Image (tube, rainbow, N blue to C red):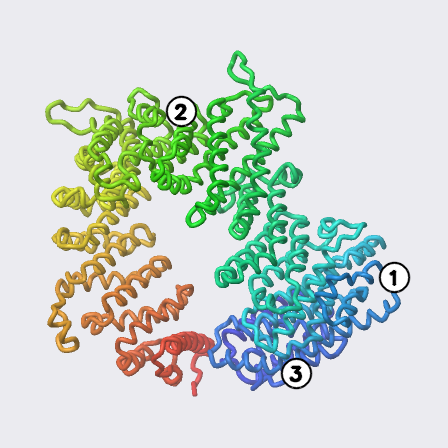
Amino acid sequence: MMYSLTVFENLINKMWLGVPSQDKMEIRSCLPKLLLAHHKTLPYFIRNKLCKVIVDIGRQDWPMFYHDFFTNILQLIQSPVTTPLGLIMLKTTSEELACPREDLSVARKEELRKLLLDQVQTVLGLLTGILETVWDKHSVTAATPPPSPTSGESGDLLSNLLQSPSSAKLLNQPIPILDAESEYICSLALECLAHLFSWIPLSASITPSLLTTIFHFARFGCDIRARKMASVNGSSQNCVLGQERGRLGVLAMSCINELMSKNCVPMEFEEYLLRMFQQTFYLLQKITKDSNAHTVKSRLEELDESYIEKFTDFLRLFVSVHLRRIESYSQFPVVEFLTLLFKYTFHQPTHEGYFSCLDIWTLFLDYLTSKIKSRLGDKEAVLNRYEDALVLLLTEVLNRIQFRYNQAQLEELDDETLDDDQQTEWQRYLRQSLEVVAKVMELLPTHAFSTLFPVLQDNLEVYLGLQQFVVTSESGHRLNITAENDCRRLHCSLRDLSSLLQAVGRLAEYFIGDVFAARFNDALTVVERLVKVTLYGSQIKLYNIETAVPSVLKPDLIDVHAQSLAALQAYSHWLAQYCSEAHRQNTQQFVTLVSTTMDAITPLINTKVQDKLLLSACHLLVSLATTVRPVFLISIPAVQKVFNRITDASAQRLVDKAQVLVCRALSNILLLPWPNLPESEQQWPVRSVNHASLISALSRDYRNLKPNAVAPQRKMPLDDTKVIIHQTLSVLEDIVENISGESTKSRQICYQSLQESVQVSLALFPAFIHQSDVTDEMLSFFLTLFRGLRVQMGVPFTEQIIQTFLNMFTREQLAESILHEGSTGCRVVEKFLKILQVVVQEPGQVFKPFLPSIIALCMEQVYPIIAERPSPDVKAELFELLFRTLHHNWRYFFKSTVLASVQRGIAEEQMENEPQFSAIMQAFGQSFLQPDIHLFKQNLFYLETLNTKQKLYHKKIFRTTMLFQFVNVLLQVLVHKSHDLLQEEIGIAIYNMASVDFDGFFAAFLPEFLTSCDGVDANQKNVLGRNFKMDRDLPSFTQNVHRLVNDLRYYRLCNDSLPPGTVKL
């Protein structure tokens, strides 16, 4: 049976046009009869498939050849025996006809939508009737309920929320007990409504009585008593019934959320919306009502998880889409709503539920912040209205991240497995909570600070008090806390301290800028505490201490130490602002803060320290050197100690990442100009000498690799050589990258120090051309040099480098790299092309002589190798290089003279290097025929940019020889649906190309395009041509393009379905 239905489905969707009309009539009459006769006995999936096949016929033939299609559905719904079947048919019709998936002509799609919209009022009336009848029928049986605890639940809040007492009374009726059939019918009706609401516009046909009815059913989700009764009555069927009832609530909430998600609300519908919110908040109050028998949390736990999910979705939509509209209604109590939302948030039974609620608060806080920014005059009034709610929220969120208050829940969080964002569940929990804290801090800085700081103090006391428990043993220091209970409490306190340090770090941005002076004392208190804590941790070496529970307490102690350094680093911008203030007054306080921080950092820059802690210390050092830049930094003994350690050849090297960071910091101390000092006081000569000796020490082994004519080199094993190259270049590249945006003087000194190493690199390059991993690192280094120091390197040397590269990358070498060496080889070629991108972008005439050889390299050597390869490697970089070549060297191809630009329209620009230009355009055209969507998008963007900036489409060569070829390719891409995600971009590009010569497009191109289309007959081509209106504005033109493409596909589908030899009229 299933197979036969699939055959029918295929026949109707793909070949219906070719079926003789007699057969069509027979199919149209026998399938519905079959459905009517057997719908009760067929398995549900076959019944649904049969419904879908009948609806497919309707999609093709209603109303012309199948006029009673929709009336039959309405009759089925109205007859009690077949109501469920009618509802299934209705839902399928809504799914298949409102937004048809199969190919139909645009005209037919529009016709179907119009036909359906004409029926909406009738359909909604019927559905309202069904739901109301079921409700009323079952309410009668429960007309005299015993006095139940819910009947007195009207409360003060409720009378606020609902002005009309009648609706409050209605909503307080006890929920009827439905039999299984009624339950089934209601769930089908609600499913129909949810789908209808997804596409019909908000209008008067959605009546108040329909909304009220939907809300009646939404109460099923939050009615625990019904579930309780079901489980008390014991039978498993009753339990299932309880679940079914919960499902009705979920379906009703889906309907409400469909309406809520529409942003465009007609004026006449606003009142309905208000009524909807009031009814939903009645439900919210019902869910969060705290009666003695139930705490809110256990009540939420008993509700269906998907009901809670839908309810949270509703609240999110309310806050993100409608709050600004509703807040202005005087009768809408926003503060009471926040009270309910607060209860709902902090009693969520699952972590995911809690995260979703935090998202809603974040949306609300964003709304408040933007409201205050747009109406600064009302700032006080707005803040006063919400202050209590925000302070409550802040306190509760802070409590939620502390083990002291929330241990049971926090211990459930996973802190090991990383998710897609590279964070663990615990890190995500903490980050989302801290974002809320930060947003409250932005609105209420003083409140937030006075809430957070005392909590931090309490935990710091515990941490700073550990010193008295440190005892010296034979093997080192030991923490003399052994009782299990004490260890557990210490563990919780350290975890909390770590979280609170992150919170304090997150708030650093609210102490700088305009508010620096006003909040200076608060920030100073924080920074002094942080400096004290970091120094304390480094001095008593808590990271190396022995503990009773090493697997737990040791990571805790390391984490607190690392977080204190990270929190201090967050205040580096504050320190920088203090530095410029202190510069005027030269305060000792600032000097002490910085030198004490250095005393805390230095002991940690050591190979024996755990990586987590070592890297935190290195990052803090980099921030001091780069962001704060105090003049006296270099003279601090602790800093000199670090210099000596790094330049000492015998000292053990730090792990790569740390080594790079420390070298960056030391280089920046010497290279970056000191703030607030004139050029004459920058002590450049001394700093220059020091920098040269620093770089010389760092590159000592590397420079010794240079082949020397006098003393032939001692052969070193290849692996050792690779290690030296890797270690040195990673450090040097990082130093250059960090200086690239700085002043000319800094870059000059940097290049002087590096000069010898750069020459060594160039000399070594040919020797390693076949070692793609080494070549990759060398090219990375050269790319960074070109980006940051090309002016300092000077023209002759730069030319020498480019020439060396061009000579080394022969066609054979390129083929070897791309085809045989896998991803590393491709990376090497990509880096090389990136270097050339920097070269072709350089203004002025210096590198222009290289253009012919660069274009030749691209078009004659690289392009032929990669053109036919399906893999995207190298292509993106190659096309970017071609784009940059055109964009920055337009005059290499189009010589624009002053006279020509004055006489625009008379003289055509002279064209030079035409073959190269044509070859590049040809390559762009070819790329649109390949399946890689990223490359397609990038190249389309490049062509559009060249048109915007350089009028590419208007150039004679493009207009006369290429324009319509490109339009043709883009239209074919749309017809083949191969790059459907880019429909919009392709439509706009076609418009921009056609707009250069609309007359040519309409008169010559379009008829020619249609003539060349296969699979459609002459009459259909005429119809397609006629339907393409001669609109010249962008929206209409692109609409016409998409219509043409859609109808062309539809006609081809129809023609494929006709039996051979059919006479077409």
Q: Please name the residue that numbered disc 2 is placed on.
A: 607
Dot 1, how many residues are within 10 Å of its Cα: few (below 14), some (14-19), or many (20+)? Answer: few
Whether residue 359 can be seen here: yes
Of the numbered discs 3 and 2, the one sitting upstream in the chain is 3
Seen in the picture, residue 1029 relative to 260 is either above or below; the reply is below
- In the image, which is nearer the foreground, mark 3 or mark 2? 2
- Disc 2, disc 1: CB below 8 Å? no
Q: From the viewer's side, name the closer residue of 721 and 401.
A: 401
Mark carried by residue 147: 1
Whether residue 248 can be seen here: no
Q: In which quarter of the image is residue 751?
A: top left
The amino acid sitting under disc 3 is Thr
Seen in the picture, residue 240 relative to 679 is either above or below; the reply is below
Could you tell whether 1016 is left or right of 740 in the image?
A: right
- In the image, which is nearer the foreground, mark 1 or mark 3? 1
Of the numbered discs 1 and 3, the one sitting upstream in the chain is 3
Q: Give me the C-alpha separation between circle 1 and circle 3.
A: 46 Å
Residue at (61% x, 29% y) in the render:
490
Q: Please name the residue that numbered disc 3 is placed on.
A: 71
